[in-house]
Image: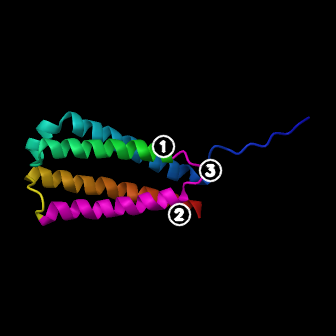
Amino acid sequence: MTAIATRPLSDSTDSLLRFALRLDATLTGILGLGVAFTADPMSRLTGLTPVQEYGIGAAFVLYGLAVYALAALPDIRRLGVALAVFNTVGTAGFIAIALADVLPLTTAGVAVALACSAYTAVFAVLQYLGVRRLA
């Protein structure tokens, strides 16, 4: 009889982090598709131009694809730390955009920016908790 030792696809300690990464990637990609498909009406709502809305949608889709692919790596600790930091910076950035008047945002545009900051904050916390669970 021959014993075959194979590595499990994921360790139970990294399941929360993998889930958080894949959920972040999936929801951000879907949100990006929605923004890209509705760029014209969204631009009237938020105060941004349609080109800016398309760019935001495309960036969200690319982020989603990249994170989903990277979530399959065998060692995801560094990725989890990097994305928790990235989402924390994104949270601060969305708040700054909403409050600093650097873009010609409407009231609805400010609300969207603040909603995006809450969204990225939730994923920063989930990814942080997933990284902590690995320790």
Range covered by the magenta-colored residues: 71-100
Residue 3 percent across, percent down from the top left: 85, 39
Which residue: 18% across, 35% down?
38
Q: Earlier in the sequence, mark 2 or mark 1?
A: 1
Q: Per the image, is 104 magenta?
A: no
User: Which residue lies under the disc numbered 3?
Assistant: 12
Q: Identify which amino acid the numbered label 3 is placed on.
A: Ser
CB atoms at circles 3 and 1 under 8 Å apart? no
Left or right position of 28 against 48: right
Single out the residue that lies furthest toward the right.
1
Q: Point out which mark residue 132 bears.
A: 2
Residue 91 image point, x, y percent: 29, 61
Cα–Cα gap, marks 3 and 1: 19 Å
Under mark 1, the amino acid is: Ala
Q: Nearer the viewer, residue 105 or 50?
A: 50
For mark 1, what is the residue? 69
Residue 82 magenta: yes
Mark 2 is on which residue type? Arg
Q: Residue at x 62, y 50 (%)?
A: 12
**Of 97 and 51, which appears nearest the observer?**
51
Q: Position of residue 20 (x, y in %)?
A: 46, 50
Q: Residue at x 57, y 53 (%)?
A: 14
Q: Quadrant of the C terminus?
A: bottom right
Quarter the N terminus occupies: top right
Q: Is residue 121 left or right of residue 5?
A: left
Query: Could you tell me which secondary element the residue under label 3 belongs to?
Result: helix
